[in-house]
Image (spheres, rainbow, N blue to C red):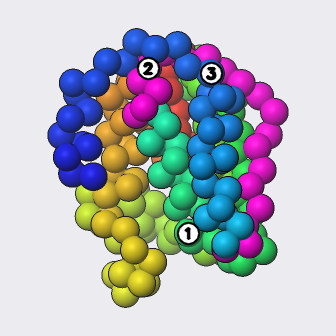
Amino acid sequence: ILLDMTGIQTIERSETISLAELTDEVLCDLTSIAEQKQIKLIQEDGDCTITGSYLLLYRAVYNLVENAIKYNHPGGKVTVIRQKKSLLNTAVPPVPTDCALVEVSDTGIGISPEYQEKIFTPFFRVDKSRSRAMGGSGLGLALVNEIARQHGGEVKVLKSDKNGSTIALILPL
């Protein structure tokens, strides 16, 4: 994964991408892992077309959905929503900008408020003992963050509590 992160800048980001097709492929590829954990994968209607690297954005969405499965409860669900939305940017005064949004929601264990920004830092792990048992390197969400940044976007926790989390990949149109 570290090699993945170092090579990101050199990858062409000029493909026209349907987020519905991309998330459909991710969910197909993760179906067997979800079934093993008895997690239901749900894809809501909606699409948005953006410009970028299919390979990188596939990896970003894959990492988000894989984490939502991994940190979920048996019998839980993971929902992916793609949509075009107007969000306020950081300009002063803030003005709405049209963005593509991929929201990944789960019914999992949640992320404590103090960790909601740190989880996107390389090698950060909320619970060292649990993450060792579950596998992973602590780089998956850092990679998502870097891919979002390379596309002029961001990734953030929209909500998280004991009933689950929603993480959004926000990309410019």
Residue 24, quarter of the rendered image: top right
x and y, in percent, of residue 169 in the image: 52, 39
Is residue 51 in the magenta section? yes
Comes first in the chain, label 1 or label 2: 2
Inspect the image, locate mark 1, and give the three-letter code of the amino acid beneath it: Lys
Residue 82, quarter of the rendered image: top right
Inspect the image, locate mark 2, and give the three-letter code of the amino acid beneath it: Gly
Q: CA distance from mark 3 to mark 1?
A: 26 Å
Q: Left or right: where does residue 93 sit relative to residue 128?
A: right
Local packing at callout 2 (Cα closer than 10 Å; few below 14, some 14-19, many 20+) is: many
x and y, in percent, of residue 147 in the image: 36, 36
Where is the C terminus found, in terms of image quarters?
Answer: top right
Q: Is residue 60 visible?
A: yes
Q: Which residue is mark 2?
A: 52
Comes first in the chain, label 3 or label 1: 3
Q: Which mark is residue 18?
A: 3
Where does the magenta region start and end? 37-56
Dots 1 and 2: beta carbons under 8 Å? no
Inspect the image, locate mark 3, and give the three-letter code of the amino acid beneath it: Ser
Q: Which mark is residue 147?
A: none
Local packing at callout 3 (Cα closer than 10 Å; few below 14, some 14-19, many 20+) is: some
Q: Please tell me whether mark 2 sits on a helix, a strand or a loop.
A: strand
Q: Which residue appears at 39% of the width and 74% of the height?
A: 135
x and y, in percent, of residue 14 in the image: 40, 12
Q: Which residue is mark 1?
A: 70
